[in-house]
Amino acid sequence: MKFGITLFATDEGIEPSELGKAVEERGFDSIWFAEHSHIPASRETPFPLGGDLPREYYRAYDPFVALASISSVTERILLGTAITLIIQRDPIHTAKVVATLDQVSGGRAVLGVGIGWNIEEMRNHGTDPSSRGRLADERLAAIREIWTKEEAEFHGSLVDFDQIFSWPKPVHRPHPPVYVGGNSAAAVARAIRHDAGWLPFSVSEPQLVAQQLAMAERAEDGSGTPITITSFDPSNHAVLSAYMESRVERILFLLPTGRESETLHRLDRLASQIESMQ
């Protein structure tokens, strides 16, 4: 099993380049950044986890800029998003920024995508919440066309463009790995439709691990969809053991946004915890 780190990179936390070096030095295989372009001041959509929206949601760096800074000081770790809000990003620009990250990092980009929960945020990007699932599907398909075709075109009901040239193309062939976030059957189905991996949030109880993985098995019909678990609480040892005994390929430990000293201390503890279990 592989282990990575996921968090919100912000202007109040450790610098991304320093974090990336520390993650690689401690043997983790990847680092994944979350995304929110902004938080509407008049937001009415409740935070899915309950309570007040955490401070880091308001202050998140653009994940691709932060990951690019890490690419210049590391050699091995994968550079992912968990998640990119695909329904809030133009697909032509998104295809280019991911391909550029893949080029400058030597083929280490990973695109984790999701639909999101903040209705007001979506609307500020011109996205109709009622069609966001269909929009996500079309944008993912369009991005793949741009990555893999010399002259790409796409004609859908929500994404439509005639033949275009767009370089760079990704180093990773046929394209960088794509993971679809979400804990629902619809998210699993979307991952399978797009020949992508599944990126669900961690469950909280060991008995729920089997139920979560059974959802994927029912949908994938034996195709073996890659599964990376995100936002895992490292203090939940029982669930960690259950995942390690499953076919999950990777666990992403959720790291709180913090200053350099406390972040490095947390990484040291995580590395020791993983070593003790292997």
Image (cartoon, helix red, strand yellow):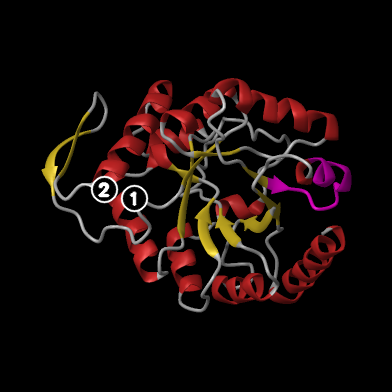
- Exactly how many numbered labels are in the figure? 2
- Left/right placement of residue 110 relative to residue 214 reads left
Judging depth in this view, the residue of 62 and 186 nearest the camera is 186
- Classify the position of the C terminus by image quarter: bottom right
Q: What segment carries the magenta color?
A: 231-242
Which labelled disc corresponds to residue 174? 1
Q: Find residue 76 and report its horizontal and vertical position in percent.
A: 54, 70
One can see residue 62 in this view: no
- Secondary structure under the numbered disc 2 in the rendered image: helix
One can see residue 48 in this view: yes
Q: Quadrant of residue 214?
A: top right
Residue matched to label 2 = 148
Relative to 23, say whether 127 is above or below: above
Q: Is residue 99 magenta?
A: no
Q: Is residue 236 magenta?
A: yes
Q: Amino acid at mark 1?
A: Pro
Q: Amino acid at mark 2?
A: Thr
Q: Are marks 2 and 1 in contact (CB under 8 Å)?
A: yes
Estimate the spatial distance between the alpha carbons at disc 2 and disc 1, rounded to whole Å.
Answer: 6 Å
